[in-house]
Amino acid sequence: MKKKEYLYRVCSWLKHQLTAWNTGGEGIHSPYLFEWVRMVMSDTHAYYIWSRIEGVRRKMLESDVVVNYVDYGSGSKQMCEGLRSERLVKDIANKSVSRRKKAQMLFRLVNWLGHQMRCGEKGMSIVELGTSLGVTTSYLASVDSRDRVLTYEGCEDVAKLASENWNVLGLNNIECCVGEIDIEKLRVKINEIGVDVAFVDANHTYDATLKYFGVLADGVHSKSVVVVDDIHYSAEMEEAWKAICADERVTTTMDLYDMGLVFFDKHYWRRHYRMRL
């Protein structure tokens, strides 16, 4: 990381810490969002599957296997072809996989929403843009086997490792699309399956982030939640987050620094919260 980028992130983190708040939900007027903060953000209970998923993470962090890595999500001008290099799996696990705390909050989010949305045999539709080694995908998919997870990974070798991890965990409700995300094909898929929960952790550029969000937002309903990762990754990502907050389809957002959550229910007040995860 360049010195300028490092200083930018340090400054943005300090700004967030000085302006964000977390009172356990106090001050949030919507009963629904108040319950969300209490049941998702403030929950400290562990689930049995977590230890198995973290076992997979540890295995990846210790792996000296070398893969041919293609990166479409670096924000590089070469993103149309991808940045190609040989990388150790443990380096990918260390730099490109969501932190445990973040992934487990996503699990709780899916679990909480699922109690309200699932009906009979019908599960939820979960979309993830940016699979990496499949650790976060595993958290999203392990809540309920009725849920269907559609995930996108640019690198074929990494996608194979992710698939092996899912087999170890016995997760059979994941569909992985390999290669650079094609916006039009994604649009067709979203129109087909809809979006209950989405996690955007792909190309970290202004244009790509807004394109992804635009397609996902076309498939949401009032109770859907879209999670955008790394919203303070760069000045460009911060501008993308501001544009998402200003989108007329959005009612409420929560800036947790590492990621932002987007809500669409028209019964909510149009308000943007800065909170500490």
Image (cartoon, rainbow, N blue to C red):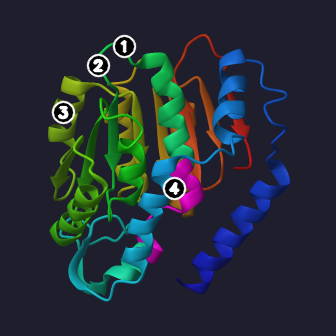
Quarter holding residue 192: top left
User: Please, what is the three-letter code of the amino acid marked with disc 1?
Assistant: Cys
Q: Is residue 268 left or right of residue 165?
A: right
Precedes in sequence: disc 1 or disc 4:
1
Residue drawn at the location 16% of the way across and 59% of the way down: 179
Structural distance between the alpha carbons of marks 2 and 3 = 18 Å
Q: Identify residue for label 2.
A: 122
Vertical placement of residue 237 versus 117, above or below:
below
**Dot 2 lies on which element?**
loop
Q: Identify residue for label 4.
A: 237
Q: Identify residue for label 3.
A: 189
Residue drawn at the location 27% of the way across and 48% of the way down: 171
Residue 100 at x, y percent in the picture: 54, 60
Residue drawn at the location 46% of the way across and 36% of the way down: 226
Residue 115 at x, y percent in the picture: 49, 21
Q: Is residue 72 left or right of residue 25?
A: left
**Dot 4 lies on which element?**
helix
Residue 161 at x, y percent in the picture: 23, 68
**Nearer to us in this view, 46 or 114:** 46
User: Please, what is the three-letter code of the amino acid marked with disc 4?
Assistant: Met
Q: Is residue 100 found inside the magenta-colored segment of the image?
A: yes
